[in-house]
Image: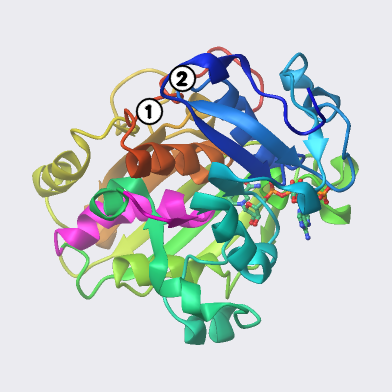
Amino acid sequence: MATGETTTSNADTAETVTASVVGGSGFTGGELLRLLAGHPQFAVAQATSREYANRTVGSVHPNLRGLDVRFSHPDDLERVDVLFAATPHGVSMEQIDEFRALADTVVDLSADFRLDTAGQYDDWYDGHAAPEHLEDAVYALPERHREELPDAELIASGGCNATATILGLGPLADAGLLADADVVVDVKVGSSEGGAGGGAAASHPERSGVVRPYAPTGHRHEAEIEQELDLSVSFTAHAVDMVRGAAATSHVLLDEVPSKAELWGAFREAYEDEPFVRLVAGGGGVYRYPEPKAVAGTNYAEVGFEVDETNGRLVVFSAIDNMMKGSAGQAVHAANVALGFEETAGLDFQGLHPVGAP
Ligand SMILES: NC(=O)c1ccc[n+]([C@@H]2O[C@H](COP(=O)([O-])OP(=O)(O)OC[C@H]3O[C@@H](n4cnc5c(N)ncnc54)[C@H](OP(=O)(O)O)[C@@H]3O)[C@@H](O)[C@H]2O)c1
């Protein structure tokens, strides 16, 4: 087989579609390749890396040793059914015409198509290079945009911290329980959120053991959360000592805190049929609330809450794996819905327990 044209063992089933992963050597690209390689209906046609072109995928992602795919240069991309872009912010918006010409469906994991308008990109980013594509983009979370996904041609996979926050607060906002609330969100995140490049702040000696506030105000995911929930939130993130995971704690201050029955009702209505959301609140055992370690490596999200009547406060907890439900898993889930596949295809597996730090 020619370099960059190798396929996985799934390729010979009748219903497979071809996929390429642009940015295949990065962290989320590696997770996409792991998921697509195990997916019954995707065949990996290409994975790109400029730095590692012609090297095997396993030489960068040791968990994928044995996968018969070599990195291609992005200039050598060929036509596929689905193109996943797992590239840094700004790359997809510059190349979106080319990406869309190469594939019927483009799933972008970056922030480039998540916001609705060019004005929002002026306010929160450094503008937008291809705003004419924004109105085509469907924002995935599938839990909230399932109806818009079938046959979508451009899918914007949600941000990891935004996903955790939105999954926690969304059902309450939709039920009208957050009107006039003050909402403060604190998210603890693992080091893989920074990507494989990382930088000095993510180097092991600097990162190990930290509980370090970063972007304490003005985090860009605030825009995504407010757009999705139509709600004003104050957002802060802390870098903590884990590799995978985002744990959002949302403090909701209300004049009148809804009853637990109302809260359970809102969460159950939103999630009782959702394959990837687990309600976890109180109960016994060691892990009584949502916990990133319990979902590490999986596409599951855990959501739960507690009521603080004394202080008029509702505390909502949500936990995801940032590289799964927060990016690659969500992207595959959205693609499954867009293409009419079983929603859980390629994603229907549990995590490990016990396990070390995720
Ligand atoms: N990490 C997370 O938890 C997470 C969660 C949600 C969303 N995201 C988003 O997903 C995207 C990827 O994140 P990541 O953490 O996987 O990043 P990463 O580990 O830094 O990987 C970036 C990938 O993009 C490639 N790349 C960089 N510049 C490129 C260019 N100009 N043209 C083509 N390929 C290019 C890199 O390979 P070469 O340089 O070798 O080509 C590499 O494969 C980002 O937009 C990020 O915001 C990440």
Q: Quadrant of residue 355?
A: top right
Image coordinates of residue 285 in percent, x first then y, are 38, 17
- In the shown orientation, is residue 342 left or right of residue 29? left
Q: Which residue is mark 1?
A: 288
- In the shown orientation, is residue 23 left or right of residue 12? right
Q: Respond yes or no on whether mark 2 lies under 8 Å from ligand 1.
A: no
Would residue 47 be seen by someone viewing this image from the given angle? yes
Which residues are drawn in magenta? 151-176
Crowd band around label 1 with a 10 angstrom C-alpha radius: few (<14), some (14–19), many (20+) = few
Q: Quadrant of residue 277?
A: top left
Location of the N terminus by quadrant is top right
Location of the C terminus by quadrant is top right
Above or below 131: residue 304: above
Q: Respond yes or no on whether mark 1 lies under 8 Å from ligand 1.
A: no
Separation of residues labelled 1 and 2 (CA atoms): 34 Å
Name which residue lies at 77% across and 39% down: 25
Amino acid type, label 1: Arg
Amino acid type, label 2: Pro
Circle 1 sits in a helix, a strand or a loop, which is it? loop
Was residue 168 drawn as part of the magenta stretch in this picture?
Answer: yes
Q: Which label number is shown at residue 167?
A: none
Would residue 226 be seen by someone viewing this image from the given angle? no
Query: In terms of depth relative to the viewer, which is nearer, 225 or 68?
Result: 68
Q: Which residue is mark 2?
A: 40
Q: Quadrant of residue 184?
A: bottom left
